[in-house]
């Protein structure tokens, strides 16, 4: 593992906490509250969903904290799955992350940034190139806009920044995470003090027209909230570059998760205090609409800047963390060896970062990132449950393994996370079957890929 030794431990406690909070707080908090209101009917139920999903995410982070402190290696979930279940499961995780899940996520975040940048530069929405592609009886229109190019260029820019060193990217993460927290704090404080709203809004019911049961609706809303909380797992991917990981990994995961739970609940209180539910349920820009109520025309610009800051920090953290997975797999001989290389000057997995940037950039250029991103949520949460189950497996299989931090509330806390995750997966499969099946097919496609890779490796060696 010589390559691993070359990585610089450049993330202190603040940098590590910024990776956790910075990748959790993205664009979802500015969008999904109105979608959740349509699912559960009243603002107070939306707030309950946020609290529930936050606690569930914290329970998952507590399990990850034990694994991260005990096995502080680059690659995070890949390393844990490889160790607990064997190389096939580790490969499936890395396959899903590298070729669609993480790269499509990066593309979606970058495009979200570009969309809000277009608030100030509307010409980004213009079509720069267009062509017709005839396929059998279907005609496909290909378009390239300034938004797509801008998103791809942003991915390239931040990927280069990450190549230049983990300390630089960690410093950027800390600055922008602090900035986005300041923006959200202003939104919370100004909304609750000058918003001229009413707490009676929280008891008002809106009709969604859905015929599903409350339990199913609660589950669908929880998936939306969990998507907003998604990112607490990213620190595990850069564990090999965290200073004193046995101490800082658990602290960063716990502090970062608690911070985001508080921010999300308070932000939703501000939204629904300011906006009547009938207005909130009919918009996809709930944050902008709320800000306009107490900031006037400046409210839209305020939120646009806030979303851009949030997206920038989330994108940087996702690029930083995601690139360590193919690096770790290549180091173990499960991906092309070129991706295991470390830059001789900057001591970063430059090849893995740039390869990830190419795939993510292609997703950004296709404009299909949202559909792909929705479909991989099911597979992603399935891996979260599997990783947390690994806490039980490794405790039994490797009792002598040094564990500087042991999961609080073991065995109940990780068991609750796994059971509730399984319930959410079943509910998601029943309510969103096509997307769930697509995610399972995507993950399963890694099995023949693994067999072909092993066959090619065997022939190469012989």
Image (cartoon, rainbow, N blue to C red):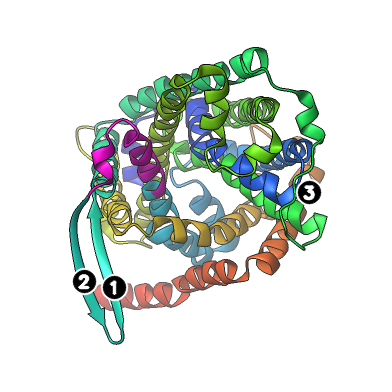
Task: Look at the numbered disc 2 and give the secondary structure of its residue.
Answer: strand
Q: Indicate the position of residue 44 as horizontal and vertical percent values.
A: 78, 35
Q: Which portion, as a residue range, is magenta?
A: 108-126
State whether residue 401 appears in this view: no
Q: Is residue 124 magenta?
A: yes
Q: Nearer the viewer, residue 30 or 323?
A: 30
Task: Look at the numbered disc 1 and give the secondary structure of its residue.
Answer: strand
Classified by dominant secondary structure, the portion drawn in magenta counts as: helix
Identify the residue at image location x=37%, y=74%.
454
Answer above or below: position of 164 versus 376.
Answer: above
Q: Indicate the position of residue 432 as horizontal and vertical percent values.
A: 63, 66
The quarter of the picture where residue 446 lies is: bottom left
Q: Disc 1 or 3, which lies upstream in sequence?
A: 1
- Asked whether, in this view, residue 435 is left or right of residue 62, the answer is left
Q: Which mark is residue 322?
A: none
- Asked whether, in this view, residue 168 is left or right of residue 25, the answer is left
Single out the mark in the foreground, 2 or 3. 2
Q: Indicate the position of residue 45 as horizontal and vertical percent values.
A: 78, 40
Single out the mark in the foreground, 1 or 3. 1
Q: Which residue is mark 2?
A: 132
Q: Nearer the viewer, residue 161 or 37?
A: 37
Answer above or below: position of 186 versus 24.
Answer: above
Task: Look at the numbered disc 3 and give the secondary structure of its residue.
Answer: helix
Q: Disc 1 or 2, which lies upstream in sequence?
A: 2
State whether residue 190 appears in this view: yes
Q: Which residue is mark 1?
A: 140
Q: Indicate the position of residue 61 as horizontal and vertical percent values.
A: 64, 39
Q: CA distance from mark 1 to mark 3?
A: 47 Å
Q: Which mark is residue 416?
A: 3
Q: Disc 2 or 3, which lies upstream in sequence?
A: 2
């Amino acid at each position: 593992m010589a390559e691993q030794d070359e990585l610089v431990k450049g993330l202190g406690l603040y940098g590590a906490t910024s990776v956790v909070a910075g990748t959790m707080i993205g664009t979802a908090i500015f969008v999904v509250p109105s979608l959740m209101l349509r699912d559960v009917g009243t603002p107070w139920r939306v707030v309950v969903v946020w609290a529930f999903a936050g606690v569930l995410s914290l329970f998952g982070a507590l399990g990850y904290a034990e694994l991260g402190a005990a096995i502080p290696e680059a690659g995070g979930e890949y390393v844990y799955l490889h160790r607990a279940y064997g190389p096939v499961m580790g490969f499936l995780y890395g396959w899903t992350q590298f070729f669609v899940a993480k790269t499509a996520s990066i593309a979606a975040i970058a495009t979200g940034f570009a969309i809000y940048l277009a608030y100030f530069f509307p010409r980004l929405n213009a079509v720069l190139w267009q062509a017709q592609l005839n396929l059998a009886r279907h005609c496909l229109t290909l378009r390239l806009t300034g938004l797509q190019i801008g998103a791809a260029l942003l991915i390239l820019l931040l990927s280069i920044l990450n190549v230049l060193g983990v300390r630089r990217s960690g410093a950027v993460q800390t600055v922008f995470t602090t900035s986005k927290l300041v923006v959200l704090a202003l939104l919370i404080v100004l909304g609750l003090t000058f918003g001229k709203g009413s707490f009676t809004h929280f008891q008002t019911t809106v009709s969604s027209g859905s015929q599903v049961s409350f339990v199913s609706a609660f589950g669908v809303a929880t998936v939306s909230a969990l998507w907003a909380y998604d990112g607490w797992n990213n620190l595990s991917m850069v564990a090999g570059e965290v200073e004193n990981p046995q101490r800082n990994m658990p602290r960063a995961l716990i502090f970062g998760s608690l911070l985001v739970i508080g921010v999300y609940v308070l932000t939703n209180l501000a939204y629904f205090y300011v906006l009547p539910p009938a207005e909130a349920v009919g918009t996809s820009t709930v944050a902008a609409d709320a800000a306009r109520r107490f900031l006037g025309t400046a409210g839209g610009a305020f939120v646009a800047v806030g979303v851009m800051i949030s997206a920038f920090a989330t994108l940087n953290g996702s690029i930083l963390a995601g690139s360590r997975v193919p690096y770790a797999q290549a180091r173990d001989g499960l991906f092309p060896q070129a991706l295991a290389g470390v830059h001789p000057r900057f001591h970063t997995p430059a090849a893995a970062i740039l390869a990830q940037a190419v795939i993510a950039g292609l997703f950004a250029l296709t404009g299909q990132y949202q559909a792909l991103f929705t479909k991989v949520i099911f597979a992603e949460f399935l891996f979260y449950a599997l990783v947390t189950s690994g806490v039980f497996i490794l405790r039994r299989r490797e009792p002598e393994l040094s564990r500087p931090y042991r999961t609080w509330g073991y065995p109940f806390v990780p068991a609750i996370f796994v059971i509730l995750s399984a319930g959410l997966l079943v509910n998601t499969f029943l309510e969103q079957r096509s997307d769930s099946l697509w995610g399972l097919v995507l993950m399963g496609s890694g099995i023949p890929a693994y067999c072909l890779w092993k066959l090619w490796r065997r022939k190469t060696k012989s």
